[in-house]
Image: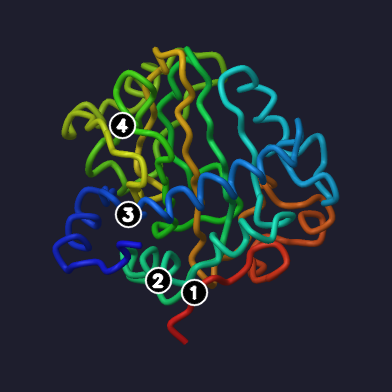
Amino acid sequence: MKNNLTEEQITTYRKEGYLIIEDFLDPHELEDWRTKVSEAVQSRTDNPMPSDKDYSEESDAIKGKKEIKGYFQQRMQLWMDNEPFRELMFDPRIGKMAADLEGIDGVRIWQDQALFKLPYAQQTPWHQDNPIWSFDSQHAITIWIAFDDATINNGCLFFIPGSHTKKYLKPEAGEPPARIFELNPELLQLQAPVPATMRAGSCSFHNGLLMHGASANMTPGSRRAMTCGFMPDGSTFNGTRNILPESYYQSLKVGDALDNNDINPLVYSRN
């Protein structure tokens, strides 16, 4: 694993809001990740979330999956019910990279997602990650690992460099993707979107406020990727349900620490 970051990489990440690391996994590691993630995904059958956990049909996590059926084979929180995958995602080297890039002391898993973009699936609209999550932070961070070559033709990510400094207005459901630029014209003053093409085994990190999307898959093959969003240790509940299990969500009040290791495990701490 290519996990040692340079000062130049950290500086670039903090300025642009993202970083691409080519050949993050070596060929053996890539095949190991592909195999274990594929087995974890298949074990879920049609369930986007762990079936033995307390997830309400009304949760944002479940409702959101219904909207993208036919575009992604998507499975979330694989760490909760698959030990081989858990060992991969709990690698403290990955957690340390996330903490180093954001300059924070520790990170917890917020959500993992297998994102297998299906053949001829439409584009993923422009969005920010953190505004839909159950905590507010300028230092949330996501890793995105390519299991196939990610190209403009098959649905690679696109990032708007420098767009990670604020929360932007969101379009209403069903509005066209370009609507976000009408609501937030300042985005047009930033650098043009950059395609994050990468070879299989490479990865990107991006800040939770970075504006990003993905192109359509215009090929007959899937574009497979594994992602995980990390929450800074010490984050607090903001009132949003998102991916929290129902009983845990009901037990929280705004301002409570999100430090339950059964829900948001601590995967790295400098302390």
Instruction: Left or right? Give the position of 170 relative to 62.
Output: left
Q: Residue 19, can we see it? A: no
Q: Residue 225, can we see it? A: yes
The amino acid on which the numbered mark 2 sits, given as a three-letter code, is Lys
Q: Label 3, on which residue?
A: 24
Question: Of the residues under marks 1 and 3, which one precedes in the sequence?
Answer: 3
The amino acid on which the numbered mark 3 sits, given as a three-letter code, is Phe
Q: Quadrant of residue 242 in the image?
A: top right
Question: Of the residues under marks 4 and 2, which one precedes in the sequence?
Answer: 2
User: Does residue 200 sit above or below 73 in this rendering?
Assistant: below
The color scheme shown is: rainbow
Question: Of the residues under marks 1 and 4, which one precedes in the sequence?
Answer: 4
Q: Are marks 1 and 3 in contact (CB under 8 Å)?
A: no
Q: Label 4, on which residue?
A: 158
Mark 1 to mark 4: distance in Å? Answer: 28 Å
Q: Label 1, on which residue?
A: 268
Mark 3 to mark 2: distance in Å? Answer: 14 Å
Q: Which of the two discs, 3 and 4, sits closer to the camera?
A: 3
What is the crowding at mark 2: few (fewer than 14 residues within 10 Å), some, or many (at least 20)?
A: many
The amino acid on which the numbered mark 1 sits, given as a three-letter code, is Tyr
Percent of width and height locating residue 85: 61, 56
Q: Are marks 1 and 2 in contact (CB under 8 Å)?
A: yes
Q: Label 2, on which residue?
A: 96
Q: Are marks 3 and 4 in contact (CB under 8 Å)?
A: no
Question: Element at badge 4?
Answer: strand
- Tally of numbered discs: 4
Q: Residue at x 47, y 43 (%)?
A: 129
Residue lying farthest to the bottom in this orientation:
271
Question: Element at badge 2?
Answer: helix
Percent of width and height locating residue 109: 57, 60
Mark 1 to mark 2: distance in Å? Answer: 6 Å
